[in-house]
Image (cartoon, rainbow, N blue to C red):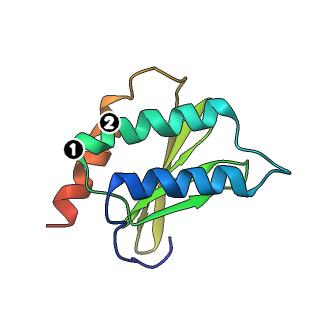
């Protein structure tokens, strides 16, 4: 992945970054379903996971949210999870519709963010 910039200060700042990316690209807008899925992810993270290091626009258009070596790219119908290691990258995805619960596997990946920052 990228470098490890300082974490965004709080989830209000994260939400503002998401809004900025959503508004910035009017020619290829982020869909309402993608934004709803981002909001679902942020809602579960607010209570248990430190704010991310990075929020960025993806290619689809999507929204990417990253903590250290963990990146979650949010689409309208799924999330893709990237875990970067020295010499390899683990990638997997899971379907997600707005309002659905996330898998135990994703929740465990997110929980590991706090452990890796201690």
Q: Secondary structure at mark 1?
A: helix
Which one is in front, 47 or 73? 47
User: Residue 81 at x, y = what percent?
Assistant: 48, 48
Asked where in the image residue 46 lies, by quadrant, the reply is top left
Query: Image point 46% across, 74% down: which residue?
Result: 87
Is residue 106 among what the camera can see?
A: yes
Q: Secondary structure at mark 2?
A: helix
- Give the quarter of the image for residue 66: bottom left
Q: Residue 60: horizontal and vertical position, in percent?
A: 73, 48
Residue, disc 1: 48
- Please tell me how crowded label 2 is: few (under 14), some (14-19), or many (20+) other residues with Cα within 10 Å: some
The residue shown at (70%, 36%) is: 31
Q: Which residue is mark 2?
A: 44
The quadrant of the rendering that contains the C terminus is bottom left
Q: Is residue 85 above or below residue 31?
A: below
Image-based side of 42 in relation to 64, left or right: left
In the rendered image, the vertical position of residue 4 relative to residue 38, given as above or below: below
Callout 1 touching callout 2 (CB < 8 Å): yes
**Residue 94 drawn at (x, y percent):** 50, 32
Q: Quadrant of residue 6?
A: bottom left
């Amino acid at each position: 992945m990228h470098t490890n910039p300082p974490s965004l200060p709080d989830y209000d700042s994260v939400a503002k970054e998401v809004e900025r990316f959503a508004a910035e690209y009017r020619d290829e807008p982020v869909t309402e379903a993608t934004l709803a899925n981002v909001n679902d992810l942020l809602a579960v993270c607010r209570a248990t996971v430190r704010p991310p290091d990075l929020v960025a626009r993806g290619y689809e258009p999507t929204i990417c949210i990253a903590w250290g070596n963990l990146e979650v790219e949010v689409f309208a119908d799924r999330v893709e999870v990237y875990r970067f290691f020295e010499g390899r990258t683990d990638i997997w995805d899971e379907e997600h519709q707005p309002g659905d619960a996330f898998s135990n596997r994703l929740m465990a990946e997110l929980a590991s963010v706090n452990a890796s920052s201690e």
